[in-house]
Amino acid sequence: MSGTGAVAERMEPRLKQHYLREVVPQLKEKFGYKNDLAVPKLEKIVVGVGLSEARENVKVVDQASEEIAAITGQKPVVTRAKRSISNFKVRQGMPIGIKVTLRRWRMYEFFDRLVTMAIPRIRDFRGLEDGAFDGHGNYNLGLTEQHIFLEIDLEKSEKIRGMNITIATTAKTDDEARTLLEHLGFPFKKRKK
């Protein structure tokens, strides 16, 4: 693009280039796909954080939003209670969490940072469970603290918060999705033979 006011072209993320050059041919060979478009790929990644303490202190939502925005590079959406639940002291419309849906290049960059920098920083890490697939080729990962991400400033972060990361793929089966994630560098526990 040329001219004034043109947006600079974005380079394709390193992980997407790896997927197109190496993963697609390997998966075509293994599963016998006839077409490149039939090969499973990452569809979206959803990062969600539950904020039960937001009932008493609404400022918690702002701080958690800043941290998730720093981690993902995208501003999160506040999720609100759909109905009142008196046992949990929750009223309809109260903020109860935040979430971010990542697609395209942001998704690939987040996945790359998650696999190469964040997951190896988990204490006593021995691999991720491969039983967290939902039967439709999507993987759910629960993290106990946000401090494994390098973007979080430990001095400004007041509380340790867990998060749920859902990796949605276009795979039809869990086996295809597991193979895709393995080829993208996801550190599953070794299967016992």
Image (cartoon, helix red, strand yellow):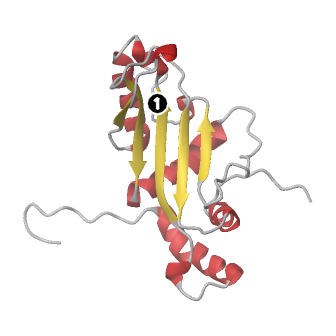
**Residue ranking furthest to the left:** 4
Q: Is residue 131 above or below residue 126?
A: below
Q: Is residue 181 above or below residue 96?
A: below
In terms of depth relative to the viewer, which is nearer, 72 or 62? 62
Residue 111: x and y in percent read 52, 52
Residue 142: x and y in percent read 61, 38
Q: Which residue is mark 1?
A: 152
The quadrant of the picture occupied by the C terminus is bottom right
Q: Is residue 189 above or below residue 7?
A: above
Give the residue drawn at x 64%, y 76%: 27
Q: Secondary structure at mark 1?
A: loop
**Residue ranking furthest to the right:** 193
Give the residue drawn at x 8%, y 69%: 3
Q: Kindly identify the amino acid type of the residue bearing the numbered disc 1.
A: Ile
Give the residue drawn at x 48%, y 32%: 49
Image side of residue 8 versus residue 177, left or right: left
**Residue ranking furthest to the bottom:** 34
Q: Quarter of the image holding residue 143? A: top right
Image side of residue 190 versus residue 91, left or right: right
Q: Quarter of the image holding residue 72? A: top left
Residue 153: x and y in percent read 45, 26
Give the residue drawn at x 64%, y 58%: 185
The quadrant of the picture occupied by the N terminus is bottom left
Q: Residues within 10 Å of mark 1 (few under 14, many from 20)?
A: some
Residue 129: x and y in percent read 73, 47
Q: How many numbered circles are shown?
A: 1
In terms of depth relative to the viewer, which is nearer, 2 or 22? 22
